[in-house]
Amino acid sequence: MKTSIVVVVLLLSATVAGFYWLPQGDLVISQSDPLSSQPDDYREPIAATPMHARINQSATFRGASPDGRLQVLNGALMVNRDLKRWMDFYLSSVGEFSIEEITEFMEAEMRTLPAPADQQALDLLNKYLAYLDDISRYDEVSGRKINGADLAGLTARMEWLEDLRRVYFADATIAAFFGDDEALDRYSLERMRLAQSGDTEAMQQLEKELPLHLRVAREKARAIETSQSLRDSIDDPEALWQARKEQFGEAAADRLAILDAERQQWQVRLADYRAFLERNADRGNIQALAEAYRIKNFSSLEQKRLDAALQASSDM
């Protein structure tokens, strides 16, 4: 398998949960945890290894908590969006680590699951890696990438992806991993086609045909985009509050103003911490000084964010 696997996501795909269960042999297939059943998250403790230390202290993962998780119900692996997010989370570090190193790490984690969930997880990981490798080679050979592609090219790639998923995965796994993505991709491409034809009435009807949870997710995404646009374009706090009130209502405008103030305070505290580190960088006990500063000025939860926040602000 190639060592340059890239986690590829379709245009406008969203990670949102559904609410149904499907059986697939001994696996438990779900798009979200059912309210009536609680997964068994017990796993054997994993021995610390140099690879685990490197992963946890890497620039990609330092200060971050894993997205998604491995879950077991009655000894069987739960195959849901949480599992896919967990795999994608660690695969996002390819480049800083080799695909072999990341695979070794994930396999070690999966082997802590009880049987038969451990082998089910390993088998599914191998299929997922092969699937991603096929996508990478398809894009490299054909050049049919999303950026700059026309409607025909995007449609061809979407159909190829849907076919590829059915080669590697059972229908129930496809529904759990990719169901919402495929619905949004088909919606997006049909909307592009209707926009080109100028059929606004059909576009409005198309929106109504989306599943309710996808419509809610799209409305939330639009609200976030609108809020960010207002914040970027309006400097005066009072004018910004008024614009938000007109757009979202008074209560939401108040909550957003409080969030703005908290963000500003966080940036000030972050800048103070960076200045402290720079002033004391040459001191032999800098690590002890930094630890004492963190304990005094940041909560335990904030301390977990510090390294990643410093890195992010340095990259801006």
Image (spheres, rainbow, N blue to C red):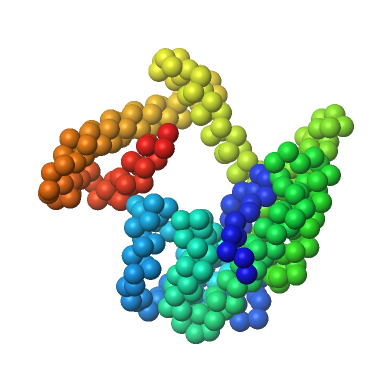
Query: Is residue 7 toward the left or the right of residue 202 in the image?
Result: left
Give the vertical position of 57 relative to 104 (above or below): above
Q: What x and y, as percent, mark residue 265?
A: 29, 31
Residue 108's quadrant in the figure?
bottom left
Which residue is outermost to the bottom?
Answer: 115
Furthest-front residue in view?
Answer: 282
Q: Is residue 252 above or below residue 297?
A: above
User: How many numbered callouts?
Assistant: 0
Residue drawn 55% across and 76% down? Answer: 122
Out of 18 and 169, give the one closest to the viewer: 169
Residue shown at the point (80%, 40%) measured from the top left: 150
Relative vertical location of residue 247 with respect to residue 139 in this rendering, above or below: above
Quadrant of the rendering where the N terminus is positioned: bottom right
Q: Position of residue 8 (x, y in %)?
A: 63, 54
Residue 258: where, in percent of width, then height? Answer: 36, 29
226 or 314, nearer to the observer:
314
